[in-house]
Amino acid sequence: MDDLLREFVTETKESLDVVDVELVRFEQEPNNAKILDHVFRLVHTIKGTCGFLNLPRLEVLAHAAETVMGKFRGGAPASADAVTLILATIDRIKIILATLEREQREPEGTDADLIADLEALSGGADRNADPPERAAGMPPAQVLERPLRPGEDSLEDLERAFRETPVDSAVPKAQAVHVKDEDPAKAASQSIRVPVDTLEQLMTMVSELVLTRNQLLEIVRGQDESEFKTPLQRLSNVTAQLQEGVMKTRMQPIGNAWQKLPRVVRDLGHELGKQIDLEMHGAETELDRQVLDLVKDPLTHMVRNSADHGLETPAERRALGKPECGRVRLSAYQEGGQIVIEIADDGRGLNTERIKAKAVSQGLATVAEIEKLSEAQIQKFIFVPGFSTAAQVTNISGRGVGMDVVRNNIDQIGGTIDVRSVAGQGVSFIIKIPLTLAIIAALIVEAGGERFAIPQLSVSELVRLRRGGDHRIEYIKDTAMLRLRDRLLPISRLTRLLGLETVLKAADEGFVVVVEFGSQAFGVVVDGVFQTEEIVVKPMSSRLRDIAMFSGNTILGDGAVIMIVDPNGIVQALGGTVATQLAAAEAAALARAERKTVKDAATSLLLFRAGSPQQKAVPLALITRLEEIDARTIELSNGRHMVQYRGHLMPLISLDDRVSVKGEGAQPLLVFSDGSRSVALVVDEIVDIVDQTLEIQVASSSPGVLGSAIIDGQATEIIDIGHFVPLVFADWFRGKDERAPARKPSVLLIDDSPFFRNMLAPVLQAAGYDVTAIARAREALDLLGGGAKFDVVVTDIDMPEMDGFALAERLRADARTANLPVVALSSVVTADTIERGRRVGFHDYVAKFDRPGLIAALKEQVDVSVAA
Amino acid sequence: MTTERTEQTMDEYVTATVGGQRFGLPILRVQDVFVPERLTRVPLAAPEIAGLLNLRGRIVTLIDVRRRLRLRGDGAEGPAMAIGVESQGESYGLLVDSVGEVVALDPKLRESNPVNLDPWIAEVSAGIYRLEDQLLVLIDVDRILGIGRKAVAA
């Protein structure tokens, strides 16, 4: 019963949150029957469940509310009073639920007041048969014995459901409980509730797994022929999927944190006599549930603030020529690795004079100091602990726990909050919070002999600096700028930012990592760029947390500890003012728009994505075809993915271990052919084909990547296909006769065992032979007698009817086949059999399981026969 | 400063030497002793932060005791040693010239900080032991880590 109750409480709470929102909507759109139906159903469900759990107070309340809503459904007008009353009822239900959660029982007391109001509203008379006292005194065993109330037909359904299950004898009460147990399970079979701790623990373990995986990859990286490669690749794929999966379980739409807001704003509006329109945008934006929990309260607080302090009364607004209805706008969107939440109102704006006075009276600044501060700096005082400008403490806000608390909460999750206010036009708060992906992709760079990680999400492109190259650094006094296309990018050496530079060095060599943070772009000059690596972000030790330049640290695959550079810290260090940042942002937007229209005719490049969000490209001329195949046709053979393509097995290759072959759906492939050989590159997505000059190049240290270029405004890896194709063919086609690529040597394989035929034929095909596999020696003679030509015959010795020796004798005896090389296969290789084989004319003798031996023997025989 | 007895009751200490001076750390606070390898510098950090290192998968912040206490000398002749300690769930290492034996000391031999003690040492010292051959400075681990200090001393 405990579990049942807990589940009921959780579910009902969720339902009630929805009811809140829906009712507010309903009030605004009283004619929307759909909303009403929805609310009605939710309340009805709550009522029904209460009956089963013997919660008379809840049941009667829900019932009364349901009745009123029934009237609305019947066409009665939904007055604001009526909605308020129902909302009050819902609040009461919440209070009862809270006690229920704590004490496992309903609180003492009566709801006669609300019920009387509700009944008065619904006309009362027809519900007299159901007074609350009766319900309250009802013993649980009588649940099924009382007359059914309207709306309780579900019991019949349960009864029927029960009859259909093969249970012989059960007391009525047990029936109810039993069926009730199944009911929610049916409805909720698609989701289960998992304690957050379990998910957190899972996340920690996945983080450790990622680290270990990286370490293993690092060990194997240098070795071409490692037996660990294939299983490690698999491990890597699984780890990546696991990581993604666990991440997903933690993500929730931010709308969950907003659910209560319409109700809050509605109540506030009523209380304050204001008309408030709450707009919500981007409710579907997802973020980590831990972060979500932490921003929930600050957001509610800020929306209250906006409604209470921000917005004027309708009369004031009228006088100012504004629409009477005030607006609070809540929006969320993802920008880079963070979520931006904006809370804006169109009210009176912050009163800087009052903030000044308060700051002075609280001793935060002297009058002289405060006069020197800018508006924006003054406005920031509202984030100082204990600061509240509300002239009088209202019920809603202004209790001195104000923006400082909000700021504290946001600081806690590594976010930032900023305020912009224009007198008479409103205030907007901009909150930026990290997605807190505990695992991020980072670009590993080198500066001053040390390695640093820069979050990949904030890196927009890489530019190589060379003396006399296209891109050079220009100086205005000591500040360096880079002319990048048609904008000027403020840049600084990372060593300088980090104080690693003893001598001021001219920044004319190295790489510029173009970092976009928020609406700003800037360049960080580094000495070298290594690979991108998935890193597990670990917080800096508390001794080092005051260094704004780093957001954390991590252990790399090779075991070294490195710092993660915080783009936010760089912005601050670069000291960009808002004005220049805005100018830069505008210029960037302009440049982006222009770039889209200007296209130099040059190389055609195919853009695709594989393994990472970063764009990759390969010259289109190298690609034979673009294919999309059904992922289910991909077969795994000898640890490699294969697909049957135009009558051949085509190996699939991945750029790196982050690219996984899809399990189902359509798998896009880039097919490359060289002579008769084809391989396909597995990609996640084919993006586009562009014509572009490869102007900016960053040579790559990782094999398989020619370098990076800016394509369509994005840093793009140019893939070296020449690296991948030999990887597949070098070991698969070793021993292939290079002189005759046009025609494959043909092999006639005779073995009575289908197992060996099936095993050997693919091996020989993979080695570059055209294989005809048959089961009987007699068929071989028929084929050869019929004029079929083969370069070599491979035959089993022990076969029914005619064995290998007899076959060889027959072939020798026939002039047409006398010179045909015959290789014998046997599971038994003894000196005797070899001697006998030689006598009958076997050219070679190979043990059945010796595949390399067979391939070597075939090569030798074919070479001899071609030479002859 | 009188002869008040600090609240510390343990009397087993791990001893270490830095710049010729002997120090003692309460044994219960010492996690391990290790040779620091592959140290990563932390730019912009206070000078006494020697760097970070990976000790069996944990990131350890190494604090150079010599710099922390403004002791003389450039470093140990042999390889430096580090004493691993933990504070508030974080791992730290105290970089010292050498680590000596574990000593059990009679609390009666312990004195509070003399008034003329060097201020840098006084800041982290929990008292002085009068050993026969020399004086041993008892280190308060939390204070030498500087946890809770507002600004990093220049």
Image (cartoon, coloured by chain):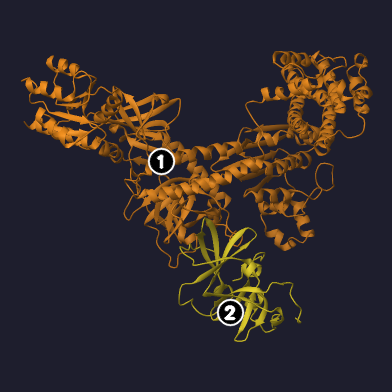
Q: Return the x and y of residue A501 as percentages of the image width and height.
A: 45, 65
Image disc number at residue B22: 2
* Marks 2 and 1 share the same chain: no
Q: Which chain corresponds to the colour yellow? A: B
The colour one sees for chain A in the rendered image is orange
Q: Return the x and y of residue A697 as percentages of the image width and height.
A: 34, 46
Q: Nearer the viewer, mark 2 or mark 1?
A: 1
Q: Is residue A618 left or right of residue A201?
A: left
Residue that badge 1 annotates: A231
What's the distance in space between the residues labelled 2 and 1, CA to CA? 53 Å
Q: For numbered disc 2, what is the local secondary structure? A: strand
Q: Residue at x 35, y 48 (%)?
A: A700
Q: Residues within 10 Å of mark 1 (few under 14, many from 20)?
A: few
Q: For numbered disc 1, what is the local secondary structure? A: helix
- Chain designation of label 2: B
Q: Is residue A732 visible?
A: yes
Nearer to us in this view, A849 or A209: A849
